[in-house]
Image: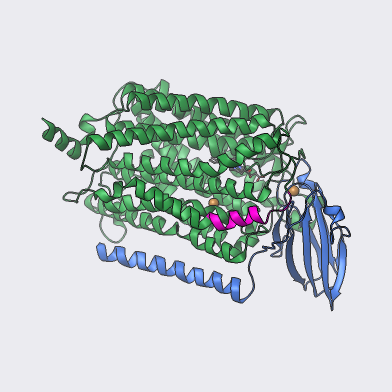
Chain colours: A green, B blue
Amino acid sequence: MEQPLKETIRQNPKKILGVNPDDAKVALAYLSVSFVSLLIGGILGLLQGLERAGLMQLPSWLNYYQVLTAHGVLLLLVFTATFTIGYQYANLSHSFGGLLAKVRKLAWIGFGLMIIGVVMVATMIILNEASVLYTFYPPLAAHPVFYIGLVFVVLGIWSCCFGVFINYRHWRKNHPGQPTPILAFFAMGVFVLWLFASVGVTIEVLTLIPWSMGIIETTNVMVGRTLFWWFGHTLVNIWYLVATSAWYVIVPKIIGGHHFKEKLIRLVVILLVILNIPGGFHHQIIDPAISIPIKYLHVFMSLAIAVPSLMTAFAMFAVFERTGRKLGGKGLFGWLKKLPWGDVRFLAPMIAMISFIPGGAGGIVNTSNQLNQVIHNTMWVVGHFHVTVGMSVVMTFFGICYWLIPYLAKRVLTPKMSKIGVIQTIIWTIGMTIMAGSMHIAGLFGDPRRTSDTSYGGHEIAASWMSYELIFGIGATFLMIAVIIQVYAVFNMMFFAPKGHTEFPVAEPEEGEEPAPMWTERWGLWIVLLLAVVAMAYVVPIADMIMNAPPGSPPIKTW
Amino acid sequence: MHRLEEIWMTVSVGILIIFMAIVGYQTFSLGMGPPSHAETIDPQKVEETAPFDDPGVKKIGDNEYEVVMTLQSFAFNPSNIEVPAGAKVTFTMTAMDVTHGFQLPGTNINAMVMPGHIQKISHTFDEPGEYLIICNEYCGVGHQAMSTTITVK
Ligand code: HEM
Ligand SMILES: [Cu+2]
Ligand SMILES: [Cu+2]
């Protein structure tokens, strides 16, 4: 009995496995919150675009920085985190044939904690008690409830992390000698990274609570900033890992092919987990109090991430070419034509992958010392992350919706909805290209980010930015339309699409590929290496910041 | 397939190493490292601590100036600075409240100025004209108004 079942699992997992209905509810709950956040965050983004362009003036009871704080928190944190959890938990349930009951409970607890946290944070932003932007650099001091809300959000995420670890361990114990299904392996990577990403920022927030209440008088602003970016930068690579799980495992199936060598895929996951956290320093290249040799070391540490990225680029194009040729594509580029461009489940992640090329190149600019000095805190940076997050990551997420949501809701993707998805993808691509493109250019001319009005009394260099700001406004309008379509599509597929069965597209290895090597499952070792890299990167600078610290700063409210 | 993979990775890693070498050469041999001054100061006693007890433009050499500057929501002190063409100017700055940015669009001057830390950055102003100085880090509700100029004659 045992053996044949295992064989079927290996050869054709989707025949017997599937997301169990209780797990589907968890995933759908997270995805609902995610797309409500996208809608609100998108509206706020449009307001920002129009205000900067001078096309609109916010009412006196709503200031630009309140809007910007909410846009950052809702999109950067809430939208991406809830999407990730919904999608990764669905993957886990599908790979393992259902979650353990206690793990499902942890996911619901996490959901509750995150909702409480987000409500606290949002209330403080709306009351104008927390216009500190999503980076909340001290000594800007928000209301204590804002920080307490953040703690709840982190606890919610941790609850989901532990859920994944427990289920992984349980599966490993029951399947000795068998490699974990690849999507579950990705989920481990994502949640391990999340746990270690949030350690630093949690320490920061826990010190800011008593400080903002007046119990502690001062805080170390440099350490706060450094701990924030330990988290902030790692978050970027958490999304990236989530997106690559779809690139490597889902997309090949959608185009009718097989996934790349599993050993390489796993190596990429492991490298992303180990090498990631130190990248945070590239946000502090022009800060005082970090020595030049340390900054140089971090150029290297940031660039190390390019290695797994380039491996991914190679692997993906190899899969596309192989599949395109199998489908009859001829010549040097004929295989490209054979790919299913009209299928939104392919088109959206494909554009996402392509936009990772300019996104990655921009990242190399940002991380190199001298170029950073030209673009730091200019609109270039905003353009950069709207390409990397707004395109590479978010468009992958959008593409996932078109099979995941009907699958979970036991409905189907109608041809009409698929077409709407293609239109949405095109409008989003146009909007982001226009907006992020003009942001990059304006930034090169010095246009600062996070600034409600950049007229500076009509100074001529400021006047030269104005036409680009108008273009941001145009791009933002396209994006708003695309957001509305996407949110409509998500909730339509969740509640109104025709009932039926949808495929959960998981690619399988090529014929005759060796199974994944078991040494890749040594998460204890990967965590030790991760900690060693973090120690290498952070011990010296943080010890220096603490031992040579100036007297601290008291809480200050300047809005 | 395997061979192609090896070539791709070798070329990729090679490019990264070359890139690191260029950044390293610029940083250490050409002295183009980013602003990273290490001195500290009590952020609540800036006005009593030298040199910030007397902010202003100081001549320190032959067409060489030091601008001792404090940044506070939402102003630079001194403001509306004037220097002669060709002057080498070193800005010595600290923040009196929250974190600010110091940027001169059109030049490579861009540095974070934080409470408790003294930041320095230098530039030679060869081209005459009126340069805009802006704060490029969000510092509060009047952040967009935090600007001044430096006029090079
Ligand atoms: C309708 C779509 C969107 C529009 C129109 C939009 C527009 C904007 C604009 C104009 C800014 C610049 C504000 C400034 O620096 O003064 C901005 C900032 C930002 N956006 Fe978006 N955006 C959109 C979608 C997204 C998405 C999907 C994400 C991430 C998932 C995102 C994340 C951010 C972040 C993190 C900032 C920086 C906030 C800060 O500096 O504190 N945006 N957005
Ligand atoms: Cu980063
Ligand atoms: Cu400012």
Where is residue A319 shown, x and y percent of the image? Answer: 29, 52
Q: Which residues are magenta?
A: A538-551
Closer to us: A541 or B110: A541
- Tell me which residue sits at (74%, 40%) in the image: A217
Total number of numbered discs in the rendering: 0
Closer to us: A445 or A529: A529
**Image quarter in which the C terminus of chain A is found:** top right
Closer to us: A32 or A180: A180
Where is residue A510 shown, x and y percent of the image? Answer: 21, 49
**Image quarter in which the N terminus of chain A is found:** top left
Quick check: A67 left or right of A396?
right
Quick check: B95 left or right of A136?
right
Image height of A436 relative to B11, above or below: above
Image height of B112 relative to A486, above or below: below
Residue A550 inside the magenta-drawn segment: yes
| Residue B47 appears in view | yes
- Tell me which residue sits at (70%, 50%) in the image: B137
- Tell me which residue sits at (39%, 23%) in the image: A25
Where is residue A511 shown, x and y percent of the image? Answer: 17, 49
Residue B67 inside the magenta-drawn segment: no
Image height of A322 relative to A170, above or below: below
Residue A407 found in image quarter: top left
| Residue A420 appears in view | no
- Residue lying at the far bottom in this picture: please name it: B62
Magenta span: predominant SS is: helix
Residue B89 found in image quarter: bottom right
Where is residue B16 shown, x and y percent of the image? Answer: 45, 66
